[in-house]
Amino acid sequence: MKLIVFDFDSTLMDGETIDFLAEPLGLMEKVAVITERAMRGELDFFESLTTRVQLLEGLEVEKVDAICRNLPLMPGAEETVKKLKEAGHRVVVFSGGFRNATGHAREVLGFDADFSNVLHARDGRLTGLVGGDMMFDFSKGDMLVRLQRLLGISEADTVAVGDGANDRSMFAHAGTRIAFCAKEILKKEANVVIDTKDLTQVLPHIG
């Protein structure tokens, strides 16, 4: 059994959740610029996350959930998760995005668990505050080590798949490090690079 950890935004899902959430507010371009800089490693992840979430203040939770239920999955995502589960692997998602999106994706795709952040809301609207499991640059690596200890799975039997700078910390603890349609900063730390939007291409590298 191996532990396979996927990033969510721009890895299992084709796009960035927070950019989609900013669209109804007319802020998609503004938020997307910050997201892109954060994923290239040009901004501190925590600061960029809290800055972007502040811009979502006032958005209705019902609208958030509706958007998160309709996010486009990456081509090959369903087949890839299905085959990994059939092979007996543990499949987990780490996301600097939000539980509204990863929780729904877990129901659709059938992976084992999701670790992400929670958008704070009051009276049915976002307050602009956020908390959760994946707030910092180091969060994914920190959680990966805890899961490896809990499940008794070695670094050699761990596969990490991601695209952005905040995935570097989990790469540090994975024997197979797959940069999927990734920023240059992450490709440098990968031992597998895939530049085609077809997630099934990770399967031959997992075994």
Image (tube, rainbow, N blue to C red):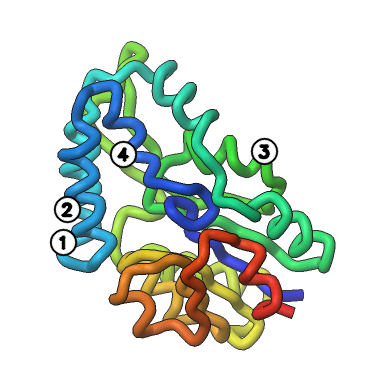
Counting residues from the start of the chain, the first of labels 3 and 2 encountered is 2
Q: Which mark is residue 47?
A: 2
User: Which of the 4 image quadrants contains residue 206?
Assistant: bottom right
Query: What is the secondary structure assignment of the residue under circle 1?
Result: loop
Q: Report the amino acid beneath label 4.
A: Asp
* Residue at (70, 57) in percent of width and height: 81
Q: Nearer the viewer, mark 4 or mark 1?
A: 4
The N terminus sits in image quarter: bottom right
Q: Report the amino acid beneath label 2.
A: Glu
Q: Report the amino acid beneath label 1.
A: Leu
Calculate the distance from the C-alpha at mark 3 to the C-alpha at mark 4: 22 Å
Residue 156, compared with residue 24, is above or below; it is below
* Residue at (59, 52) in percent of width and height: 75
Looking at the image, residue 2 sits to the left or right of residue 94; the answer is right
Q: Count neighbours of disc 2 (C-alpha within 10 A) and say few if under 14, some if 14 to 19, many if 20 or more.
A: few
Calculate the distance from the C-alpha at mark 4 to the C-alpha at mark 1: 17 Å
Q: Count neighbours of disc 3 (C-alpha within 10 A) and say few if under 14, some if 14 to 19, many if 20 or more.
A: few
Relative to the observer, which residue lies in front, 68 or 98? 68
Asked whether residue 138 appears in the rendered view, the answer is no
| Residue on which the image places disc 1 | 43
User: Which of the 4 image quadrants contains residue 41?
Assistant: bottom left
Calculate the distance from the C-alpha at mark 4 to the C-alpha at mark 2: 16 Å
Q: Which mark is residue 107?
A: 3
Counting residues from the start of the chain, the first of labels 4 and 1 encountered is 4
| Residue on which the image places disc 4 | 19
Question: Whole-percent x and y of residue 159?
Answer: 59, 75
Residue 50, compared with residue 177, is above or below; it is above
Q: Nearer the viewer, mark 3 or mark 4?
A: 4
Tags 4 and 2 in contact by the CB under 8 Å rule?
no
